[in-house]
Amino acid sequence: MRKRCHLKLTFHGFHANFAAARQRRGLFIFDETKMLEEYLPILILVGVALIVAIVFLLLSVYLGPKRPNKWKLSPYESGMDPIGQARERYSVSFYMVAMEFIVFDLEVVFLYPFAVRFTQLGWGTFAAMMLFLVILFIGLIYTLKKGTLDWDTKPLKN
């Protein structure tokens, strides 16, 4: 008589029973410990990076020179002396450049996985990526014609 494989409500139990049923049919063997072992080097790297960062931070606090004076304790902002109120308005050009940066940063997020798997993907994916790049290039030409990267004091073109 054949044993039946009952699914449990827990995630771990589900995979254990599912793997047992597949193993009996000879389809595959699900080994959770092997999967976790593959992530071990990444976890070790993150742990070492955190420890090194904390150690260097503490060393700079305890071993660094402490010579406070009037100029060092004064407020400092982006290489300029703080004159006037902090509530001054920024030019729209700052925001336009920030939005362009976000758009082209997202372009890299979509382009990098495509470049990694370029040889394994078909021509349809290549055409879709080229269309994506053409649309972004048209957007860049549009913003350049609008003058968002010109840092003169004149306002943006309409």
Image: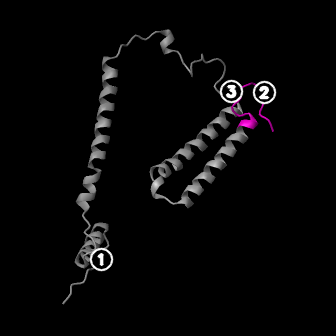
Mark 1 and mark 2 lie on one chain; the one further toward the N terminus is 1
Write the residue at 45% across / 50% down: 116
Write the residue at 37% across / 13% down: 66
Residue sticking out furthest to the right: 158
Front position among marks 1 and 2: 2
Q: Which type of secondary structure does the marked residue at label 2 adopt? A: loop
How far separated are the C-alphas under marks 2 and 3? 18 Å
Nearer to me, 128 or 68 = 128
Badge 1: residue crowd in 10 Å (few <14, some 14–19, many ≥20): few
Compared to residue 153, the image places residue 24 above or below, namely below
Q: Which type of secondary structure does the marked residue at label 1 adopt? A: loop
Magenta region: 144-158
Magenta highlight: main SS: loop
On residue 88, the disc is 3
Nearer to me, 125 or 20 = 125
On residue 154, the disc is 2
Front position among marks 1 and 3: 1
Specify the amino acid type for callout 2. Answer: Lys
**Rendering coords of residue 118 (x, y %):** 48, 53
**Rendering coords of residue 51 (x, y %):** 29, 34
Nearer to me, 64 or 142 = 142
